[in-house]
Image: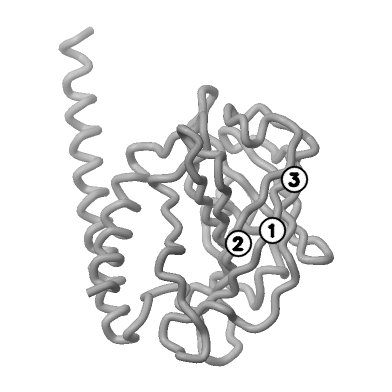
Amino acid sequence: MGEEAKPLKTVRAAGLVVLGTAGVAVGFGFAVVGALRRNRPIHSVGTVVPGRLIIDAPGTTGSALFDSVGETPLIGRLSGSASWSVELPDIMGLAVRIPGGGHHGGEVDLLFASTGTGRLTRYILQLRTSSGTGPLTTMFPLTGVEGNIVFRLDPEPRNDYRLSYSRNSRPWQSLGRVSLEPSGEPTQRSNDPAGSDDLTLRFRPVANPPSGLTVPAWVRAVRAPAYKAAHLAWHA
């Protein structure tokens, strides 16, 4: 048994090395784009608003944050990936920070992007004109005791988003909603003196998962080097 496991471990280790190398390459690409734009390489213009996470249909995700009835304050940042200076289709994003819902009482960072919702399309990015014209998912899964978890937001009236989750690519199950305060003009910019940019508001989905859930090794191998390289280059 032990001898049979060695080749498998070797293959997994090699796979993580390949993914890590890809992550570094993506981070380098982000750094080049950031240097050319003289700001964040992606999601450079955003609107930051307070909101609430409201759980009214507790699930079985493995995280206490989503598995019990309750209401928690949060911070949301709405943005487009390319942040075009004119109105064009973009990959829409909603980053969410939830204080106190992470490991050891830390903060939780979740990144939602415009994708499909099918068993395969939930992992494929889609172009939209706004975050209110279609579903958003976390795309990259989190790991719980019973498998992988992907979260989903569906826009509703009055800046609300219906929150659901799927385990192991099964049908979506409702959890509650994310309610954001009304937003107007972009309030956070990286390259415009007319808007402030909070340097402390940097979402870290790899470092800040919800309590009870972990980031899979392959996701860390891709995301962590990419974010680190882009972060260092942007600050430099």
Name the mark on residue 28: none
The picture places residue 40, in percent across and down from the top left corner, at 37, 76
Q: Tag 2: residue type?
A: Gly
The CA distance from mark 1 to mark 3 is 10 Å
- The residue to which callout 3 is attached is 54
Name the mark on residue 76: 2
Number of numbered tags placed on the structure image: 3
Dot 1: element: strand
Above or below — where is 40 with respect to 109? Answer: below
Q: Tag 3: residue type?
A: Ile
Q: Are marks 2 and 1 in contact (CB under 8 Å)?
A: yes
Name the mark on residue 51: 1
Q: Nearer the viewer, residue 13 or 209?
A: 209
Dot 3: element: strand
The CA distance from mark 2 to mark 3 is 14 Å
79 vs 143, left or right, is: right
